[in-house]
Image (spheres, rainbow, N blue to C red):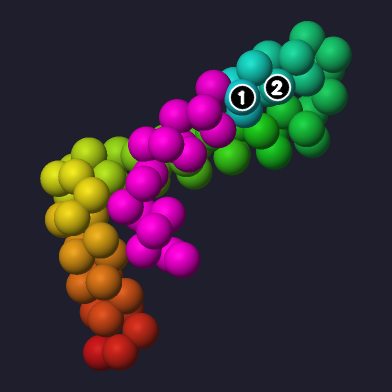
Amino acid sequence: TFYFFIRHTPFWAVPIILISAEFSYVFWIRKKKKSLVFFISIAFMSLIFLIFYIYAGGPEKSVKKAIDLMWYYFYS
């Protein structure tokens, strides 16, 4: 399941970024700081995943890089 999400990152990251940006704007207008920070952090995390996807080089290479990162951090 994790590799499926890595492979299809643009299909979930872009809508989450847009939805989180809209909600963060709404909560910024209402002056609700905790909700604002929550939605900004979700948008930022999705942006990081999208940047990793683009940096890795697409669906096939991003999964391979994710596997390599997991092996490096968890099994070395």
Q: Is 57 above or below relative to 47?
A: below
Q: Position of residue 19 (x, y in %)?
A: 61, 24
Res 53 visible: yes
Q: Amino acid at mark 2?
A: Phe
> Which residue is rendered at x = 48% and y = 39% of the image?
12
Q: Position of residue 8 (x, y in %)?
A: 36, 46
Q: Which mark is residue 46?
A: none
> Which residue is rendered at x = 78% and y = 9% of the image?
29
Q: Residues within 10 Å of mark 1 (few under 14, many from 20)?
A: some
Q: Secondary structure at mark 1?
A: helix
Cβ–Cβ under 8 Å for marks 1 and 2: yes
Q: How many marks?
A: 2
Res 28 visible: no
* Quadrant of the image occupied by residue 38: top right
Q: Position of residue 58 (x, y in %)?
A: 19, 45
Q: Secondary structure at mark 2?
A: helix
Q: Is 58 above or below relative to 16?
A: below
Q: Which residue is mark 2?
A: 23
Distance between mark 1 and mark 2 Cα atoms? 6 Å
In the figure, is residue 10 to the left or right of 71? right
| Picture quarter with the C terminus | bottom left
Q: Which residue is mark 1?
A: 19
* Quadrant of the image occupied by residue 5: bottom left
> Relative to the observer, which residue lies in front, 24 or 57?
57
Let me know if residue 10 is in the magenta part: yes
Q: Residues within 10 Å of mark 2 (few under 14, many from 20)?
A: some
* Magenta-colored span: 1-18
> Which residue is rendered at x = 46% and y = 66% of the image?
1
Q: Amino acid at mark 1?
A: Ile
Q: Position of residue 32 (x, y in %)?
A: 84, 24
